[in-house]
Amino acid sequence: MSDFKIAQRERDSVNVLELKGYLDAHTAPKLEEAFQNLLKSQRFNIVVNCRELSYISSAGLGVFMAFIEDVRKNRGDIKLSNMTPKVFNVFDLLGFPLLYEIVKDEHEAVRKFSEKAK
Amino acid sequence: MKEQRLHIESRTERLIAVREFVSTAAREFGFADEEVSKIALAVDEACTNIIKHAYKFDPNRSITVLVRGRNGAFEVAIQDKGNVFNPQQIPTPDMKEYLAHFRRGGLGVFLMRSLMDKVEYDIKPGKTNEVRLTKYLPR
């Protein structure tokens, strides 16, 4: 099934996950695996670029919930960027903006990590 | 609107078909894109709950999705024959408290209640369980 894809890259020592397509109960395990791999290799500064994410259900939101605690314990963070209004509405409905840093673009999200490191 | 129905096997890869089916019907009934997305998400959550909880990921059971519309009310009934799972027993979580403890699960029920105007359950153990989601056209 090609309804959800993740591209991973590094930018200024920050790990960027680019999500594309539909994130639901069927595709959420893919994102879970991507986070597991990052944590296993001790990479805790993570930006999730949602520019091409067309859809998210609670199964996808649950993945962010599952990893944020571990990531922050290791002095990292999961920051989200480039959300379409439709996807942002779902995050907002559940109060996620209280807990996650959601910024306009990837550049800003990456910069926040380097500011913190100074 | 004439009643339409879709049968699917209890597999998460079928969720996309459910969303398409419900979206087409909701659009036809007169909802704008934003409302169509909300209805499709609520129905996805209901089906996901059935697959996970009522059928415990058994891929060979079935789910029926019925859509009907009358007098400005668009109703989606989702039926299963699985184990009794009564989401009515799940209290609406205090999201602030909930997020502070990084809990998962229960988010779907919260979303369904937030996205739709009415959520009703008809639980008949051993027969058919039904959850009915209703949304009204804006006047």
Image (tube, coloured by chain):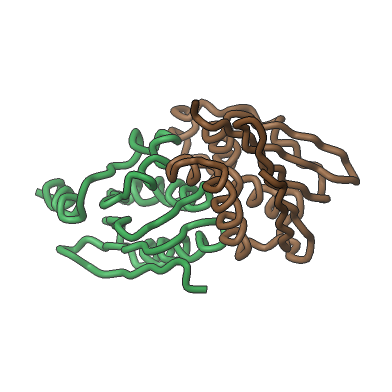
Chain colours: A green, B brown
Nearest the eye: B112 or B66: B66
* Residue B33 found in image quarter: top left
Please count the marks in the image: 0
Locate residue B130, reporting x and y percent.
77, 41
Q: Quadrant of the N terminus of chain B?
A: top right
Residue displayed at 43% across by 35% down:
A93
**x then y, percent, for residue B104:** 54, 43
Residue B18 falls in which quadrant of the image? bottom right
Determine whether, in the image, residue A108 is placed left or right of residue B24.
Answer: left
Residue shown at the point (53%, 51%) measured from the top left? A59
Image coordinates of residue B6 in percent, x first then y, are 71, 57
- Residue B40 placement, left or right of B58: left
Of B1 and A98, nearer the camera is: B1
Residue for point 70% across, 37% down: B132
**Is residue B114 positioned above or below B31 on the image?**
above
Q: Which residue is the extreme one toward the right?
A: B126
In the rendered view, does B120 fall on the left or right side of A16? right
Query: Residue visible at 35% across and 51% down?
Result: A71
Percent across and percent down for residue B10 are: 71, 60
Q: Residue furthest bottom?
A: A1
